[in-house]
Amino acid sequence: MKIYSIYDPEFAPYGKVLEGYDTKPLTDTLTAVTPLPEGVEYVPSQPELEALPAANLIAANAYGGMPVQLGWCSGHNTKLNCLEYHRDSELNCGTKDFILLLAREDEIVDGHLDTGKVKAFKVPAGVLVEVYATTLHYAPCSAAAGEGFRVLVALPRGTNGPKPEITALNSEDKTLWACNKWLLAHAESSEAGQGAFVGLDGVNIDIAGDI
């Protein structure tokens, strides 16, 4: 699979680089407080990250004053498994290079997405990147064989919290998996085994041979 850079023009529909932020306190804190499991672990809100001055800047500048949460996703991964989206952009920043597997919400047809639409993008260490609300994404992937990742995940506060109790009004509602989180799972994923809507058709992409 071809791995693009977030500085390539192909990234423009999916997100953009946010310039002007000093990310070193964020990456230093990620290194200090986050584990590096063999699998993937996600924590939506980490007090040590949210206590940094950068957290106030992200809330004020990147989110225009909205309340936000700063958490992390860490571990080892090379597979797609699922794709999710939110009603708001997500910000990521890693202590090392990492790879995002992305698609676009407008590529969903009748609730399903062909995994052949997915593209891979490498994010350099320390770069703060915005992933648009209309971009399908999920857990980061390692950028080098055997190397893990520690990635900041900034989102509006409450995102990925408990799923609200709703009465389904349309087909999208069946993909709601948590607060502000709509999820399409591949049949091979553990999320599918937990009851997530199976909406990814095709190969469950694995970039292990491409890094």
Image (tube, rainbow, N blue to C red):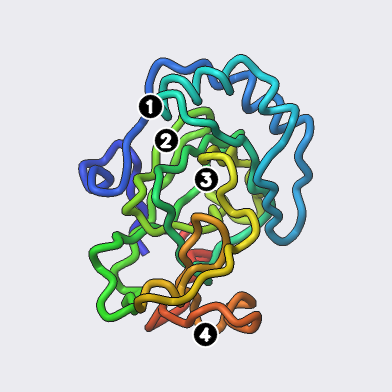
Q: Earlier in the sequence, mark 3 or mark 1?
A: 1
Disc 2 to disc 1, how far (Cα)?
Answer: 6 Å
Residue 91, percent across and down? 47, 38
Q: Which mark is residue 9?
A: none
Q: Which residue position is annotated with label 2?
A: 129
Q: Which comes sooner in the sequence, label 2 or label 1? A: 1
Q: Residue furthest front?
A: 167
Residue position for label 1:
18
Disc 4 or 2, which lies upstream in sequence?
Answer: 2
**Disc 4 to disc 1, how far (Cα)?**
35 Å
Report crowding for label 2: few under 14, some 14 to 19, many 20 or more residues within 10 A (C-alpha): many
**Disc 4 vs disc 1: Cβ atoms closer than 8 Å?**
no
Mark 4 or 3: in front is 4
How many residues crowd mark 1 within 10 Å: few (<14), some (14–19), many (20+)? Answer: few
Residue at coordinates 39% horizontally, 51% vertically from top-left? 87
Tell me the residue at 54%/37% (across/down): 154
Q: Earlier in the sequence, mark 4 or mark 1?
A: 1
State whether residue 12 is above or below residue 82: above
Which residue is tagged 4?
187
Q: Are marks 4 and 3 in contact (CB under 8 Å)?
A: no
- Residue type, mark 4 in image: Ala
Q: Amino acid at mark 2?
A: Val
- Seen at 50% across and 25% down, the residue is 59
SS class, disc 2: strand
Q: Are marks 2 and 1 in contact (CB under 8 Å)?
A: yes
User: In the image, what residue type sits under mark 1?
Assistant: Leu
Label 3, on which residue? 98
